[in-house]
Amino acid sequence: NIDTAMYAAKSSGKNNFKFFTEKMREQINERMQMENHLRQAILRNEFELHYQPQVDLGTGRIIGMEALVRWNHPEWGMVHPEKFIRVAEECNLVIPLGEWVLCEACRQISQWSRQGLEAVCISVNISARQLKSRYLFTLIDNLMMTHQIKPGMLELEITESAVMDDPEQTIPRMKELKNKGVALAIDDFGTGYSSLSYLKLLPLTRLKIDRSFVKDIETDPNDAAICAATIALARTLGLGLVAEGVETEAQLEYLRAQGCDSAQGYYFSKPLPANNIMAFVSRHQQEVMSS
Ligand code: C2E
Ligand code: MG
Ligand code: MG
Ligand code: MG
């Protein structure tokens, strides 16, 4: 659509074309500014992780948490990943950022487990670029050893497109990770290019149904059908399942009725700063026990 914009601008006169190039220059400047700020942010340690609980729909207990990165910019305030992950990917900064995320998540896992938080798996999002770097595997090895991460305490979330990008290389690496006791989930399932024949070959633990299918589950019969089919697929393949972005009781009830294992979303909790997690979890688990 750059071409059509260019054509429209050209065909309606010189001024429009000038406007168009100025707009482009503005975008390029913004992008370069973001890149510079990101570089600084890594050096200045401006990132933090928030955690969103995942609830088992059978027992009601919290069984996991997804680590979600936040950028605490000195002027812009708290920046969400939609605003910067893509830029970080494009300029390769997602590698050092992703390393920081993994280190921080593993440090947090060991701190929480010393504080008595048990049987809660922490999920970390891994970008396509990261998955391609051999160093990722060395890093995870080291982190698991240093922080005494036990099997099942760490899960990596990978998108379909990241896996399908280079399956010949990725699948053996995923198997290596699985052997080390790292759980593997497909994130945003249903939004990428899936191949069911690859799905069968992947050493997965869970699928995560994308939020876009859950959102209109009550009103859109297609979305409801996609969720039901994904739940059935996961069950057939012997995989766990998490529904993302559950906001209402009705969404939850539909998913539960279809046999969905677990869910995360604002209905249970927004992502919380690490400091609020212990209190949230103990309050939640107590409520479950007393009900
Ligand atoms: P994701 O992995 O699919 O994460 C789920 C996103 O949905 C999160 O957005 C979460 O805050 C949001 N969400 C959860 N429940 C609800 C809900 O009930 N309603 C609505 N409207 N939204 C909900 P967030 O934190 O802004 O993250 C966006 C994306 O950025 C993530 O999508 C993930 O792809 C990426 N990301 C986050 N942290 C990292 C990271 O450490 N590394 C990499 N590579 N990517 C990350
Ligand atoms: Mg995720
Ligand atoms: Mg997701
Ligand atoms: Mg998503």
Image: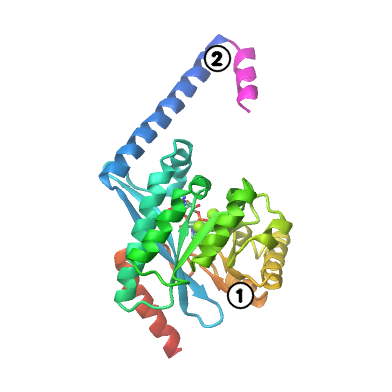
Give the image location of residue 154, x and y in percent: 45, 66
Give the image location of residue 181, x and y in percent: 49, 69
Q: What secondary structure prevails in the magenta region?
A: helix
Q: Is residue 164 above or below residue 4?
A: below
Task: Please name whichever residue, 223 or 239, is drawn nearer the observer in this view of the structure.
Answer: 239
Q: Is residue 190 above or below residue 183?
A: above
Residue that appears at 65% across and 23% down: 4
Q: How many numbered marks does the figure carry? A: 2
Q: Is residue 85 above or below residue 107?
A: above
Task: Please name whichever residue, 146 or 243, is drawn nearer the observer in this view of the structure.
Answer: 146
Kindly identify which residue carries mark 2. 17
Residues at marks 2 and 1 touching, judged by CB atoms closer than 8 Å: no
> Is residue 4 magenta-colored?
yes
Residue that extends furthest to the bottom in the rendered view of this protein: 290
Residue that appears at 72% across and 62% down: 221
Question: For mark 1, does the 10 Å Cα neighbourhood hold few (<14), some (14 to 19), or many (20 or more) residues?
Answer: few
Give the image location of residue 86, x and y in percent: 48, 41
Q: Helix, strand, or loop for circle 1?
A: helix
For the residues marked 2 and 1, what is the alpha-carbon distance in whole angstroms? Answer: 53 Å
Q: What is the number of the mark on residue 253?
A: 1
Residue that appears at 38% across and 34% down: 35
- Give the magenta part as a residue range: 1-13
